[in-house]
Amino acid sequence: MSEPVTVKILDREFLIACTPEERPGLIAAAGYLDGKMRDMRNRGASGLDRIAVLAALNIAHELLTLQQARASDASQLAQHLLSLKSRLDAALPASLQ
């Protein structure tokens, strides 16, 4: 069941409907977005639309960077596991494989 939650972003209040389980994540996301938008404003960006777009681009860039790092880590882990499996296969007698 959804219930309204008030979040404040760049000194403006927004009423967002979400489930009780989503509430902590929504509040955290709103706080993060507010921080990014304030950062853009403090860097000299003006106009709410421009500030919002710049903040969204920065957040999207962070997300893509994290996704690429995760994919790279997963690939390295898979390679390491294959190497370990090959070493174990070579070390174990054929009867145990």
Image: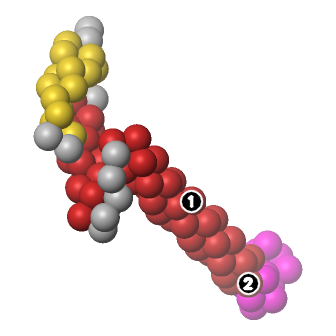
What amino acid does circle 1 point to? Leu
The residue to which callout 1 is attached is 64
| x then y, percent, for residue 56 | 44, 49
Q: Is residue 58 magenta?
A: no
For residue 7, what is the image quadrant? Answer: top left
Left or right, 9 with reference to 50? left
Seen as rendered, the residue at the extreme top is: 1
Instruction: Establish if 32 lies above or below 26.
Output: below
Q: Is residue 92 magenta?
A: yes
Residue 49 appears anywhere in the view: yes
* 10 Å crowding of disc 1: few (<14), some (14-19), many (20+): few
Left or right, 9 with reference to 79? left
What amino acid does circle 2 point to? Ser
- Give the extent of the magenta segment: 86-97
**Residue at x-position 72% and y-position 78%:** 79
Quadrant (top left/top right/bottom left/bottom right) for the C terminus:
bottom right
**Residue at x-position 17% and y-position 34%:** 12
For residue 96, what is the image quadrant? Answer: bottom right
Q: Main secondary structure of the magenta part?
A: helix
Quadrant (top left/top right/bottom left/bottom right) for the N terminus:
top left
| x then y, percent, for residue 69 | 56, 70
Label 1–label 2 contact, CB within 8 A? no
**Residue at x-position 42% and y-position 48%:** 50
**Residue at x-position 30% and y-position 48%:** 33
The residue to which callout 2 is attached is 83
Between 77 and 70, the residue placed more toward the observer is 70
Between 76 and 64, the residue placed more toward the observer is 64
